[in-house]
Amino acid sequence: MLMLDDQTRAALWPHVTETIEKYLTEIETARAAPLLDVETIRSTLAVCDFAKPVNALEAVDFVSGQLWEHLVHNGHPRYFGLFNPAATTMGIVADALVAAFNPQLAAWSHSPFPIEVENHLLRAFGQRFGYDPAKMDGTFCSGGSEANHTALLTALTNAFPEFNEGGARALSAQPVFYISSQGHHSFLKAAKMSGIGTEAVREIPLAESLRMDLAKLSEQIAADKSAGFYPLMIVGTAGATSTGVVDPLIELAEIAEAEKMWFHVDAAWGGGAAFVPLLREAALTGIELADSITFDAHKWLSAPMGAGVYLTRHSEILKQTFGVATGYMPRDAAGLDVIDPYTHSIQWSRRFIGLKVFMSLLVAGWDGYAEVIGKQIELGDRLRQGLAESGWRIVNRTPLPVICFVDEKNSSADFIEAVVSTILRSGEAWISVARIGQQATPVIRAGITSYRTTEKEVDGLVELLNRTRQQVLSNNT
Ligand SMILES: *Cc1c(COP(=O)(O)O)cnc(C)c1O
């Protein structure tokens, strides 16, 4: 029952690959944004009572049909969204191989090849960011949220030897950390999970550039010190989710160094800029000064979901943070110069996350990625220009392809919401409303995300926005 018979499998595998191939080649015919029809989905599922076995091929057809209907298709060429990828072909292959071989990456002796693949990749990424590959460490994670959680735990362990055993309640002073108000919400969860609480998160206002305001940061640090708090860490965001803006990394590194704080760079999406030399310089200079870095291969590298990376130039800190011993852990690798990943990670049983990244990179090469990322930068510039020529005002400045804008004449919240919701209802493209700055002003946000997006879709988006603007304005009069 669990391993299907030879005949069924012989029919099943080609059916699955045909289903995938159809999706990859015909995705453009789907709506980019789904209708949000909760009742239909629930009543479809209500029939699945698991009382009678379903034919395997029918099960594949049922699920793929539902996925076609009820999904934002991230891989769609008109998905101008958050940083969710159109999965690489090799990533799809790798995820199937991983499911089939199903390696367990907790202990080195159980998965020697997979673990060495991941170590090899971590060092290759570290080097791209400017770390010395011989003096660094890292771990693959479920995603950027886990990597950011890992960063906070390593910063705490580094600052407070008593944190490991005594926990947050044993600390001599309440630690606080600093992040721009445009930083990622995963740090709020990390603060809860580490036991220091969300009041420890100091959200620093933005300067006019939408980067963290350095003067406000210094004021807050001084105020915290005189009130008896312990300034623990500065988080620089390299590619904010809403605006794509990069905080001033070099200046943040200097402040962190002067105050003996941990400096973490959250480059979950923007880290992809490290793969294009000129772009690395324009966007990421200073990232090499970070004590730790978050990077998501499931964003700009287009690996299928769930490929986060945490990197650090402190080669001992992960072990100090996560090292534990258990009676049942395998010891067969004792004496070898290897690391058991579970002693360096939040996770124990762990999927072979790195393979989809490794196989994608093997086949595309650095140059293949540089070409795709470079092209997306160009498309971002083209979109900016097309919007500016059509009476839209760009409100963010970044070398990365995220464009936030409002209509020059109608920037009211209602108008912005109406334009975006009209486009989503049409299914013609996926864009979103972002709220930025101290007033959380709503703006329209469009990011170049899918490697399928070309000039045609970018020009089409400008045209769609212009058309929708007219429609919304005439509905209002
Ligand atoms: C996506 C993102 C995260 C969260 O990463 P997940 O992989 O979604 O958990 C954190 N920070 C930034 C800047 C991001 O873009």
Image (cartoon, rainbow, N blue to C red):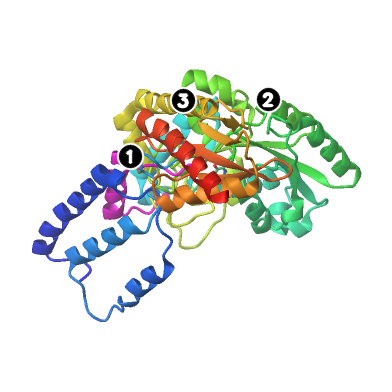
Q: At label 3, which amino acid type do we have?
A: Arg
What residue is shown with label 1?
88
Q: Secondary structure at mark 1?
A: loop
Question: Residue 339 versus residue 272: which sits nearer the camera?
Answer: 272
Which numbered marker is on residue 382? 3
Labelled pair 3, 1 in contact (Cβ < 8 Å):
no
Give the residue at the far top of this rendering.
Answer: 278
Badge 3 marks a residue whose secondary structure is helix
Ligand 1 quadrant?
top right
Circle count: 3
Front residue (pair 331, 4): 4
Residue 426's spot in the image, x, y percent? Answer: 41, 50
Q: Quadrant of the rendered structure where residue 226 is?
A: top right
* Residue 180 % position (x, y): 70, 40
Q: Secondary structure at mark 2?
A: helix
Observer-nearest residue: 23 or 13? 23
Residue range corresponding to the magenta coloring: 82-107
Q: Earlier in the sequence, mark 2 or mark 1?
A: 1
Going from the N terminus, do you reach mark 3 or mark 2 first? 2
Q: Looking at the rendering, which quadrant does residue 46 occupy? A: bottom left
From this viewpoint, is residue 295 visible? Answer: no
Give the Cα distance between marks 3 and 2: 29 Å
